[in-house]
């Protein structure tokens, strides 16, 4: 109890300190924010109207001391039944990897596209990648070549919306040929403007080399793709960005793509660019992200076969976590006006007339879509990160994707027992580790790299 109070206090102090570094919002910014919230609420409402839904159930609170706090007690998780990722809709069991690819995978893709993440539009304009700058610089004490790129989407069909994807690629200066690259969904500049020198998400904890240094010192490269340059992270933006451009500024239909699918689409376009860059080994590209970007990572990995590995950081609900589990964040939260834009409109039904038990898929089915390619599911410690992300729910998404990986002759997690904090379950193509830190991928980078080396080899400095 005392510890929880101290941790909350610590969190509060950190938040106050961060806010103190922010300039006060100007009246213009306030009114912009209010306009955005109104636009989001209107978009959310119109989608409910399209679906014929009057109202949605509201989700539990993320505040542990609120009366409607989300469940954090394992003993109170009601039983649930998951859809079997090896059984077809006609009831037949799939017996081989080849049949799974031919029959079950398309069923899962259709279910995810129609009910959860949305479909790609039939026509998406081309992206023209431009090199904005190339410079020699350093990360830590490692010399790198850093390229800043802009992915300009052809908007000739609807010129009032422009989409310019922001991407940075860094490779070791000393590399003599193409190198493996880990691409992060993240920030190139501080999301707080020039005011707060925030630790970008995914950095190692104090005293550890950053993820960038760790990759570069292995002889690998990294890239950062900025999701908000593809699609805004709010409902108001759904008539803009790549979704709005394809819809010519109109509202979405219930099975049109949401932001997660749009971000994942952008990641695929970045891979298109990498295929033209002689510094990148296109057989060894990984995707990584945290939290909502962890969800985007799981989606990108599922839909883009050119990603060879994934590092899915604290993705929580809507990512690699069992949604039927009543623990931490729930479908009702995701369907609210603050988060529904990540998904397609049809997803809202599961917080209205339907429940998560009615979903044809769950978090394990999403992980299964990546099979047989290796995925690493990462989380922090509940004591530090909190229970909202549901570390065990993420572990179970990995466990229940196991039979699909095994069908491919790959190794699953090797256990269905939730491991102690810090235990690396990294012997197989589904990996899991709960590090001792907070809401970050930072402390898991060295474990991820050790695991990735098994697939990518060429860890010059590692063996
Ligand atoms: C909220 C949200 C999560 C999300 C997280 C984040 O906590 O409920 O679903 O992952 O924000 O992206 O930071």
Image (spheres, helix red, strand yellow):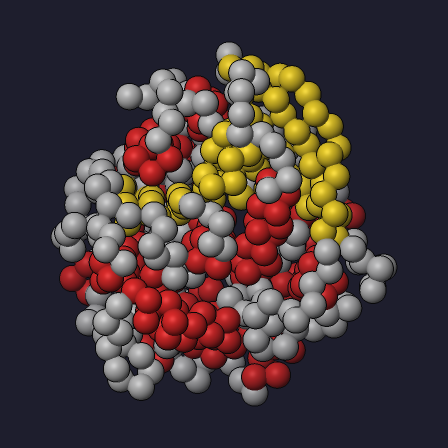
Residue at the top extreme, as displayed? 141
Q: Position of residue 368 (x, y in %)?
A: 34, 61
Q: Position of residue 357 (x, y in %)?
A: 32, 77
398, 387: nearer the viewer:
398
Residue 102 in sight here: yes
Q: Is 196 placed above or below 359 here?
A: above
Q: Is 109 placed above or below 232 here?
A: below
Question: Which residue is painted at 77% across and 68% down in the image?
Answer: 248
Residue 448 in sight here: no
Question: Which residue is painted at 54% across and 69% down in the image?
Answer: 118
- The image shows a total of numbered marks equal to 0
Question: Which residue is painted at 34% across and 47% down in the image?
Answer: 374
- Looking at the rendering, in which quadrant would you find the N terminus? top left
Q: Position of residue 319 (x, y in %)?
A: 41, 57
Q: Is 102 placed above or below 135 here?
A: below
Question: Which residue is painted at 28% across and 48% down in the image?
Answer: 429
């Amino acid at each position: 109890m005392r510890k929880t109070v101290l941790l909350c206090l610590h969190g509060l102090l950190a938040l106050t300190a961060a806010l103190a570094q922010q300039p006060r919002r100007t009246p213009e910014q306030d009114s912009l924010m209010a306009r955005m919230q109104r636009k989001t609420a209107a978009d959310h409402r119109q989608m409910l109207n399209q679906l014929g839904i009057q109202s949605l159930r509201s989700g539990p609170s993320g505040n542990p001391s609120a009366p409607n706090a989300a469940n954090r007690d394992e003993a109170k998780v009601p039983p649930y039944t998951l859809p079997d990722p090896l059984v077809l809709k006609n009831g037949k069991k799939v017996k081989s990897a080849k049949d799974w690819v031919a029959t079950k995978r398309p069923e899962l893709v259709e279910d995810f596209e129609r009910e959860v993440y949305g479909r790609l539009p039939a026509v998406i304009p081309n992206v023209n990648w431009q090199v904005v700058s190339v410079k020699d610089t350093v990360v830590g004490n490692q010399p790198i070549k850093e390229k800043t790129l802009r992915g300009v989407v052809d908007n000739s069909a609807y010129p009032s919306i422009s989409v310019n994807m922001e991407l940075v690629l860094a490779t070791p200066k000393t590399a003599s040929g193409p190198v493996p690259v880990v691409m992060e969904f993240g920030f190139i500049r501080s999301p707080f403007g020039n005011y707060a020198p925030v630790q970008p998400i995914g950095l190692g904890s104090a005293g550890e080399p950053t993820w960038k240094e760790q990759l570069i010192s292995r002889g690998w490269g990294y890239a950062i793709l900025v999701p908000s340059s593809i699609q805004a992270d709010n409902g108001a933006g759904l008539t803009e960005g790549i979704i709005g451009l394809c819809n010519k500024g109109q509202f979405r239909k219930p099975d049109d793509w949401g932001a997660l699918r749009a971000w994942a689409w952008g990641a695929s376009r970045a891979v298109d660019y990498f295929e033209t860059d002689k510094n990148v080994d296109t057989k060894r590209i990984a995707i990584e992200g945290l939290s909502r970007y962890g969800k985007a990572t799981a989606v990108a990995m599922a839909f883009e076969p050119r990603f060879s590995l994934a590092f899915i950081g604290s993705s929580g609900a809507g990512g690699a976590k069992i949604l039927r589990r009543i623990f931490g964040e729930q479908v009702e939260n995701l369907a609210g006006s603050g988060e529904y834009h990540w998904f397609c409109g049809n997803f809202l039904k599961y917080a209205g007339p339907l429940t998560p038990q009615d979903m044809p898929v769950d978090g394990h089915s999403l992980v299964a879509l990546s099979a047989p390619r290796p995925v690493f599911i990462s989380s922090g410690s509940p004591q530090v990160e909190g229970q909202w992300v549901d570390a065990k729910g993420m572990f179970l998404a990995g466990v229940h994707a196991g039979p699909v990986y095994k069908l491919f002759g790959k190794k699953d997690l090797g256990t269905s027992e939730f491991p102690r904090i810090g235990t690396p379950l990294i012997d197989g193509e589904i990996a899991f580790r709960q590090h001792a830190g907070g809401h970050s991928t930072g402390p898991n980078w060295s474990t991820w790299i050790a695991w990735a080396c098994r697939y990518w080899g060429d860890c010059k400095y590692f063996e």
